[in-house]
Protein backbone atom coordinates (compact mmCIF):
# COMPACT_ATOMS: atom_id res chain seq x y z
CA UNK A 1 0.00 0.00 0.00
CA UNK A 2 2.88 2.34 0.69
CA UNK A 3 4.39 1.59 -2.74
CA UNK A 4 1.02 2.16 -4.43
CA UNK A 5 0.78 5.63 -2.92
CA UNK A 6 4.41 6.37 -3.87
CA UNK A 7 3.75 5.29 -7.47
CA UNK A 8 0.83 7.72 -7.77
CA UNK A 9 2.93 10.47 -6.19
CA UNK A 10 5.78 9.87 -8.67
CA UNK A 11 3.52 9.85 -11.72
CA UNK A 12 1.77 13.00 -10.46
CA UNK A 13 5.09 14.82 -10.09
CA UNK A 14 6.22 13.69 -13.55
CA UNK A 15 2.95 14.86 -15.11
CA UNK A 16 3.08 18.21 -13.34
CA UNK A 17 6.72 18.78 -14.30
CA UNK A 18 6.27 17.69 -17.92
CA UNK A 19 3.32 20.04 -18.42
CA UNK A 20 4.99 23.01 -16.78
CA UNK A 21 2.92 23.06 -13.60
CA UNK A 22 4.58 24.53 -10.54
CA UNK A 23 4.31 22.41 -7.40
CA UNK A 24 6.20 22.89 -4.15
CA UNK A 25 8.44 20.11 -2.89
CA UNK A 26 6.45 20.08 0.31
CA UNK A 27 3.03 19.82 -1.36
CA UNK A 28 0.70 17.29 0.24
CA UNK A 29 -0.34 14.18 -1.65
CA UNK A 30 -3.97 15.06 -2.40
CA UNK A 31 -3.27 18.58 -3.75
CA UNK A 32 -0.41 17.13 -5.81
CA UNK A 33 -2.66 14.61 -7.54
CA UNK A 34 -5.28 17.29 -8.15
CA UNK A 35 -2.66 19.62 -9.66
CA UNK A 36 -1.40 16.83 -11.92
CA UNK A 37 -4.94 16.07 -13.05
CA UNK A 38 -5.49 19.75 -13.74
CA UNK A 39 -2.27 19.97 -15.76
CA UNK A 40 -3.45 17.11 -17.97
CA UNK A 41 -6.60 18.99 -18.97
CA UNK A 42 -6.56 19.94 -22.64
CA UNK A 43 -8.48 22.16 -25.03
CA UNK A 44 -11.13 22.38 -26.33
CA UNK A 45 -13.47 22.76 -23.42
CA UNK A 46 -12.92 23.49 -19.79
CA UNK A 47 -12.23 19.91 -18.81
CA UNK A 48 -10.61 16.73 -20.08
CA UNK A 49 -12.98 16.30 -22.99
CA UNK A 50 -16.35 17.37 -24.25
CA UNK A 51 -17.95 14.15 -23.00
CA UNK A 52 -19.59 14.39 -19.58
CA UNK A 53 -19.28 10.68 -18.87
CA UNK A 54 -15.58 10.59 -19.68
CA UNK A 55 -14.98 13.54 -17.38
CA UNK A 56 -16.84 11.71 -14.62
CA UNK A 57 -14.72 8.59 -15.13
CA UNK A 58 -11.48 10.59 -15.01
CA UNK A 59 -12.68 12.31 -11.85
CA UNK A 60 -13.50 8.92 -10.32
CA UNK A 61 -9.97 7.71 -11.11
CA UNK A 62 -8.59 10.77 -9.30
CA UNK A 63 -10.77 10.01 -6.28
CA UNK A 64 -9.44 6.45 -6.19
CA UNK A 65 -5.87 7.76 -6.24
CA UNK A 66 -6.32 10.42 -3.56
CA UNK A 67 -8.03 7.87 -1.28
CA UNK A 68 -4.70 6.07 -0.98
CA UNK A 69 -3.20 8.66 1.36
CA UNK A 70 -5.34 8.06 4.48
CA UNK A 71 -5.21 4.28 3.97
CA UNK A 72 -1.42 4.36 3.64
CA UNK A 73 -1.17 6.54 6.74
CA UNK A 74 -3.17 4.02 8.73
CA UNK A 75 -1.79 0.79 7.31
CA UNK A 76 1.04 1.28 4.82
CA UNK A 77 4.79 1.63 4.97
CA UNK A 78 6.48 4.94 5.61
CA UNK A 79 5.73 5.40 9.29
CA UNK A 80 7.29 3.85 12.37
CA UNK A 81 4.76 1.73 14.22
CA UNK A 82 4.55 0.12 17.63
CA UNK A 83 2.81 -2.87 16.09
CA UNK A 84 2.25 -4.32 12.63
CA UNK A 85 -1.16 -3.22 11.29
CA UNK A 86 -3.62 -5.91 10.31
CA UNK A 87 -3.66 -5.74 6.50
CA UNK A 88 -5.80 -8.20 4.56
CA UNK A 89 -5.02 -9.19 0.98
CA UNK A 90 -8.15 -7.52 -0.35
CA UNK A 91 -7.03 -4.15 1.05
CA UNK A 92 -3.58 -4.40 -0.50
CA UNK A 93 -4.95 -5.55 -3.87
CA UNK A 94 -7.57 -2.80 -4.01
CA UNK A 95 -4.97 -0.13 -3.22
CA UNK A 96 -2.67 -1.41 -5.95
CA UNK A 97 -5.42 -1.58 -8.57
CA UNK A 98 -6.68 1.89 -7.65
CA UNK A 99 -3.19 3.31 -8.06
CA UNK A 100 -2.78 1.61 -11.43
CA UNK A 101 -6.12 2.90 -12.78
CA UNK A 102 -5.09 6.51 -12.27
CA UNK A 103 -1.43 6.05 -13.26
CA UNK A 104 -2.27 4.31 -16.52
CA UNK A 105 -4.77 7.00 -17.42
CA UNK A 106 -2.37 9.80 -16.50
CA UNK A 107 0.60 8.36 -18.40
CA UNK A 108 -1.41 7.67 -21.55
CA UNK A 109 -2.89 11.14 -21.32
CA UNK A 110 0.56 12.61 -20.85
CA UNK A 111 1.83 10.69 -23.86
CA UNK A 112 -0.82 12.25 -26.10
CA UNK A 113 -0.11 15.66 -24.65
CA UNK A 114 3.65 15.51 -25.17
CA UNK A 115 3.47 13.90 -28.59
CA UNK A 116 0.88 16.49 -29.63
CA UNK A 117 -0.27 14.25 -32.46
CA UNK A 118 -2.45 16.70 -34.39
CA UNK A 119 0.19 19.36 -34.94
CA UNK A 120 1.85 17.81 -37.99
CA UNK A 121 -1.49 17.13 -39.68
CA UNK A 122 -2.84 20.57 -38.79
CA UNK A 123 0.28 22.26 -40.11
CA UNK A 124 -0.06 20.29 -43.34
CA UNK A 125 -3.67 21.27 -43.97
CA UNK A 126 -2.91 24.92 -43.18
CA UNK A 127 0.14 25.23 -45.44
CA UNK A 128 -1.02 24.00 -48.81
CA UNK A 129 0.43 20.50 -48.64
CA UNK A 130 -0.33 18.41 -51.72
CA UNK A 131 -3.47 16.33 -51.66
CA UNK A 132 -1.55 13.06 -51.75
CA UNK A 133 0.72 14.05 -48.85
CA UNK A 134 -2.20 15.42 -46.85
CA UNK A 135 -4.17 12.20 -47.32
CA UNK A 136 -1.18 10.18 -46.17
CA UNK A 137 -0.84 12.28 -43.01
CA UNK A 138 -4.58 12.14 -42.38
CA UNK A 139 -4.62 8.34 -42.60
CA UNK A 140 -1.50 8.05 -40.43
CA UNK A 141 -3.17 10.08 -37.68
CA UNK A 142 -5.49 7.10 -37.02
CA UNK A 143 -8.29 9.52 -36.19
CA UNK A 144 -10.58 7.00 -34.52
CA UNK A 145 -7.83 6.09 -32.05
CA UNK A 146 -7.14 9.66 -30.94
CA UNK A 147 -8.63 11.26 -27.80
CA UNK A 148 -11.95 12.90 -28.54
CA UNK A 149 -10.62 16.43 -28.08
CA UNK A 150 -7.86 15.71 -30.63
CA UNK A 151 -10.48 14.45 -33.08
CA UNK A 152 -12.46 17.64 -32.58
CA UNK A 153 -9.43 19.89 -32.93
CA UNK A 154 -8.50 18.29 -36.25
CA UNK A 155 -12.11 18.55 -37.42
CA UNK A 156 -12.25 22.27 -36.63
CA UNK A 157 -9.18 23.01 -38.74
CA UNK A 158 -10.34 20.89 -41.69
CA UNK A 159 -13.76 22.54 -41.52
CA UNK A 160 -12.24 26.03 -41.48
CA UNK A 161 -9.87 25.32 -44.35
CA UNK A 162 -12.57 23.66 -46.43
CA UNK A 163 -15.12 26.43 -45.87
CA UNK A 164 -12.37 28.90 -46.72
CA UNK A 165 -12.10 27.37 -50.17
CA UNK A 166 -9.11 25.04 -49.89
CA UNK A 167 -9.92 22.02 -52.04
CA UNK A 168 -7.39 19.63 -50.51
CA UNK A 169 -8.98 19.97 -47.08
CA UNK A 170 -12.39 19.41 -48.65
CA UNK A 171 -11.42 16.30 -50.59
CA UNK A 172 -9.36 14.70 -47.84
CA UNK A 173 -11.24 15.51 -44.66
CA UNK A 174 -14.71 16.87 -45.38
CA UNK A 175 -16.31 15.35 -48.46
CA UNK A 176 -15.67 11.71 -47.38
CA UNK A 177 -17.14 12.45 -43.95
CA UNK A 178 -20.25 13.97 -45.56
CA UNK A 179 -20.74 11.09 -47.98
CA UNK A 180 -20.33 8.22 -45.50
CA UNK A 181 -17.76 6.01 -43.89
CA UNK A 182 -18.74 7.25 -40.46
CA UNK A 183 -16.71 4.66 -38.60
CA UNK A 184 -13.63 6.38 -40.01
CA UNK A 185 -14.94 9.87 -39.14
CA UNK A 186 -15.92 9.79 -35.45
CA UNK A 187 -18.62 11.93 -33.92
CA UNK A 188 -16.20 14.37 -32.30
CA UNK A 189 -14.37 14.88 -35.59
CA UNK A 190 -17.68 15.68 -37.29
CA UNK A 191 -18.57 18.05 -34.45
CA UNK A 192 -15.29 19.82 -35.13
CA UNK A 193 -15.99 19.99 -38.87
CA UNK A 194 -19.31 21.69 -38.22
CA UNK A 195 -17.77 24.19 -35.82
CA UNK A 196 -14.96 24.95 -38.28
CA UNK A 197 -17.32 25.32 -41.23
CA UNK A 198 -19.38 27.90 -39.34
CA UNK A 199 -16.65 29.90 -37.59
CA UNK A 200 -13.29 31.00 -38.92
CA UNK A 201 -10.10 30.84 -36.88
CA UNK A 202 -10.62 34.53 -36.12
CA UNK A 203 -14.12 33.94 -34.75
CA UNK A 204 -16.07 35.33 -37.72
CA UNK A 205 -19.08 33.58 -39.25
CA UNK A 206 -17.63 32.02 -42.37
CA UNK A 207 -20.37 29.73 -43.66
CA UNK A 208 -21.57 30.34 -47.22
CA UNK A 209 -24.80 29.27 -48.89
CA UNK A 210 -22.94 26.71 -51.00
CA UNK A 211 -21.80 24.94 -47.83
CA UNK A 212 -25.29 24.76 -46.32
CA UNK A 213 -26.04 21.28 -47.80
CA UNK A 214 -22.82 19.82 -46.36
CA UNK A 215 -23.37 21.52 -43.02
CA UNK A 216 -26.86 20.04 -42.72
CA UNK A 217 -25.75 16.59 -43.95
CA UNK A 218 -23.05 16.44 -41.30
CA UNK A 219 -25.49 17.64 -38.67
CA UNK A 220 -27.98 14.95 -39.68
CA UNK A 221 -25.27 12.30 -39.24
CA UNK A 222 -25.00 13.03 -35.52
CA UNK A 223 -27.07 11.46 -32.75
CA UNK A 224 -29.72 13.87 -31.52
CA UNK A 225 -28.16 14.78 -28.12
CA UNK A 226 -24.79 15.59 -29.72
CA UNK A 227 -26.45 17.60 -32.49
CA UNK A 228 -28.66 19.68 -30.21
CA UNK A 229 -25.81 20.32 -27.77
CA UNK A 230 -23.61 21.50 -30.64
CA UNK A 231 -26.32 23.75 -32.06
CA UNK A 232 -26.74 25.47 -28.70
CA UNK A 233 -22.96 25.77 -28.35
CA UNK A 234 -22.74 27.33 -31.83
CA UNK A 235 -25.65 29.66 -31.12
CA UNK A 236 -23.79 31.01 -28.13
CA UNK A 237 -20.58 31.35 -30.16
CA UNK A 238 -22.14 33.41 -32.97
CA UNK A 239 -23.68 35.99 -30.65
CA UNK A 240 -22.11 39.31 -31.71
CA UNK A 241 -19.71 37.53 -34.09
CA UNK A 242 -19.03 39.40 -37.35
CA UNK A 243 -19.79 37.88 -40.74
CA UNK A 244 -17.10 37.56 -43.38
CA UNK A 245 -17.68 40.04 -46.18
CA UNK A 246 -16.46 37.98 -49.11
CA UNK A 247 -15.57 34.36 -49.81
CA UNK A 248 -11.93 34.16 -50.96
CA UNK A 249 -12.20 37.85 -51.93
CA UNK A 250 -14.25 36.98 -54.99
CA UNK A 251 -17.82 36.35 -53.86
CA UNK A 252 -19.90 38.53 -51.56
CA UNK A 253 -21.41 36.72 -48.60
CA UNK A 254 -25.04 37.64 -47.89
CA UNK A 255 -26.14 36.39 -44.46
CA UNK A 256 -29.84 36.31 -45.42
CA UNK A 257 -29.05 33.99 -48.32
CA UNK A 258 -26.90 31.74 -46.13
CA UNK A 259 -29.66 31.36 -43.54
CA UNK A 260 -32.27 30.80 -46.25
CA UNK A 261 -30.12 28.01 -47.67
CA UNK A 262 -29.67 26.51 -44.21
CA UNK A 263 -33.41 26.52 -43.55
CA UNK A 264 -34.18 24.99 -46.92
CA UNK A 265 -31.69 22.20 -46.30
CA UNK A 266 -32.81 21.91 -42.69
CA UNK A 267 -36.08 20.31 -43.75
CA UNK A 268 -34.03 17.10 -44.06
CA UNK A 269 -33.17 17.09 -40.37
CA UNK A 270 -34.94 14.87 -37.84
CA UNK A 271 -37.77 16.57 -35.98
CA UNK A 272 -35.85 16.54 -32.71
CA UNK A 273 -33.27 18.94 -34.14
CA UNK A 274 -35.80 21.55 -35.28
CA UNK A 275 -35.94 23.93 -32.33
CA UNK A 276 -32.19 24.10 -31.75
CA UNK A 277 -31.52 24.46 -35.48
CA UNK A 278 -34.07 27.25 -35.83
CA UNK A 279 -32.59 29.04 -32.81
CA UNK A 280 -29.16 28.99 -34.47
CA UNK A 281 -30.57 30.30 -37.75
CA UNK A 282 -32.42 33.08 -35.95
CA UNK A 283 -29.26 34.08 -34.08
CA UNK A 284 -27.28 34.14 -37.32
CA UNK A 285 -29.83 36.57 -38.78
CA UNK A 286 -29.91 38.68 -35.65
CA UNK A 287 -26.12 38.90 -35.64
CA UNK A 288 -26.24 40.14 -39.22
CA UNK A 289 -28.83 42.77 -38.29
CA UNK A 290 -31.49 41.14 -40.47
CA UNK A 291 -35.13 40.56 -39.59
CA UNK A 292 -36.17 36.95 -39.00
CA UNK A 293 -39.37 36.31 -40.95
CA UNK A 294 -39.42 32.54 -40.39
CA UNK A 295 -42.11 32.74 -37.70
CA UNK A 296 -44.50 34.42 -40.18
CA UNK A 297 -43.83 32.05 -43.06
Image (cartoon, rainbow, N blue to C red):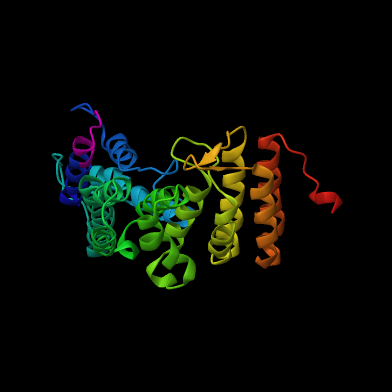
Q: Residue furthest front?
A: 250
Tell me which corner region of the image, top left, top right, bottom left or bottom right, holds residue 97: bottom left
Residue 89 position within the rendered picture, expressed as x and y whole percent measured from the top left: 22, 64
Q: Nearer the viewer, residue 113 or 17?
A: 113
Pinpoint residue 57: horizontal percent, then vertical percent.
Answer: 40, 55
Counting every numbered tag in the picture gives 0
Measuring 43% from the left and 52% from the top, which residue is drawn there?
162
Q: Is residue 51 visible?
A: no
Q: Is residue 39 visible?
A: yes
Q: In the picture shown, does residue 66 fall above or below 219?
A: above
184 versus 214 height, above or below? below
Q: Does the magenta-highlighted stretch encompass residue 106?
A: no
User: In terms of depth relative to the viewer, which is nearer, 73 or 14?
Assistant: 14
Q: Nearer the viewer, residue 232 or 99?
A: 232
Which percent across, then down, holds residue 180? 46, 72
Specify the segment rendered in magenta. Answer: 15-22
Write the residue at 46% across / 35% down: 202
Q: Quadrant of the C terminus?
A: bottom right
Return the residue nearer the eye: 34 or 6: 34
Q: Is residue 17 magenta?
A: yes
Is residue 289 rendered to the left or right of residue 296? left
Q: Is residue 244 left or right of residue 158?
A: right
Amino acid sequence: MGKSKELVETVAKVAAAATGATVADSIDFKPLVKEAQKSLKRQPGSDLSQDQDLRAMAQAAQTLATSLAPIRNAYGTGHGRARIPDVVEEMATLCLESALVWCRWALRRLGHLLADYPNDLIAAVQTGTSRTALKKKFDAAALAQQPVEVQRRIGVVFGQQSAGGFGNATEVGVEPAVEGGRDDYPIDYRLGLLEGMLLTAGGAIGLTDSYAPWFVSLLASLPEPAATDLLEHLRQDVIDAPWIGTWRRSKDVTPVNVVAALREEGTRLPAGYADAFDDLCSELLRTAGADDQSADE
